Amino acid sequence: MSSQSVEWSVLESIHPTICISNEDAIVTLLVPVELGIEHPVHIFHVPHDTYLVASSFSVSTDVPSHSASLSVLPPLHFRIALPPTYPTHAPPIIQSLRATSAWLPPPTLSFIKERMATMWSPGDDSGVLYTWVEWIRTGDFLAEVGLLGDDRHSIQIPHPSPQLLLTPLHAYASLSKSDEFAHTSYLCAICLSERKGVHCLALSCGHVFCRSCLVDMWGLHVKEGQVSRVGCPEPNCGKTDAEDADGLREATEDEASAVLSENELDRWKWLRRKRDLERDPTMIHCPMEYCQEPVPKPESDASRVDVSDEDESGWARLRTCTACDYSFCAFCTGLTLLPTPSHFQIHLRLPLSSARFPRTPCYRTPIWS
Ligand SMILES: [Zn+2]
Ligand SMILES: [Zn+2]
Ligand SMILES: [Zn+2]
Ligand SMILES: [Zn+2]
């Protein structure tokens, strides 16, 4: 048995619910933060630009308006590549890291990746995965990433829309009496067999299915391009009587990323964008990962348009999400976007004086140039 498979089987026996898969030298881990006792969690507001790029967040002196008392925080989802010479001669490579419900800001996730890379040392053939898992699971990382309050007990989470984050944090906490879930049996409505929770996935609607059933079913639908079939298989889930009884409640991005492979996930996102565009060519999903709300083309508002040809005006490209208040360029959607001054003038054709955006680099060149 190779050191890699020894490491994996040990980790799997300790943390069966965390070890999701190990295929073709790609390991998938879903690591919840289990604090043991309840901690006060304060979600404080930061502007979008700070949320996306700041390396540290200063807590505003205002009383945080969104607080909860929680003993668990939603899992971090790791996809990790193990090079053939891991663990002795090469470090594992974190291919992707997501926080369920996007509860951690992107710069914090980057910091976590960098910090984890320093935990591996050459020559140690026992592997680093257990250390990684424990650093996250026990919440030890919270202090290092600067989310622990001065009292070393409360947790401070920066977020552009605190009220949007509070709901999934509560939902996860109530669902995840995780031991309880792992040892309870559930009847899977796909294969009609009883499985222990450890082999299952609870969707955000509360319906529970075998993980392997969902992997097969959703994988097939993604392959066949049936994006509307990637959803909760429970009949009528999330539907009111008025709605199309055939349609499924579609999977959220968190659900899809917990089930689909990286390639399937990319294809699913692409299919979904394509479908939405076909339905309504002016509809765009909010590019903020935690939000994803549909943002329709704004009603033309003559008072704001300062370019004579309305269709060509920059304002038509500027969208503001009503759910989270993020403003973005409709031409660059689908990515995390921070327009530069020149972007502001070229894509949006707006006078620079009207810029509400931070002057930080745009991450991608426009498709049409
Ligand atoms: Zn099943
Ligand atoms: Zn459901
Ligand atoms: Zn939004
Ligand atoms: Zn743009």
Image (cartoon, helix red, strand yellow):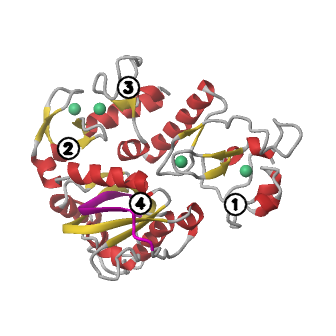
Q: Residue at x 56, y 28 (%)?
A: 275
Q: Which residue is mark 3?
A: 248
Residue 42 seen by the camera: yes
Number of residues whose C-alpha sits closer than 10 Å to that of mark 1, classed few (under 14), some (14–19) or many (20 or more) = few
Q: Amino acid at mark 1?
A: Arg
Magenta segment boundaries in residue numbering: 62-84
Dividing the picture into quarters, in which one does residue 16 lie?
Answer: bottom left
Could you tell me how far apart the alpha carbons at marks 4 and 1 are, in whole angstroms?
40 Å
Instruction: Give the image location of residue 254, x and y in percent.
Output: 39, 46
Instruction: Name the residue tied to disc 1.
Output: 356
Dot 2 or dot 3, earlier in sequence: 2
Q: Which secondary structure, mark 2?
A: helix
Label 4 or label 2, whichever comes before in sequence order: 4
**Residue furthest to the right:** 308
At x 24%, y 70%, the residue is 138
Residue under label 4 = 81
Q: Which residue is mark 2?
A: 199
Query: Spatial distance from mark 2 to mark 3, Cα to Cα?
Result: 23 Å
Front residue of this view, candidates 131 and 269: 269
**Camera-side mark, 4 or 1:** 1
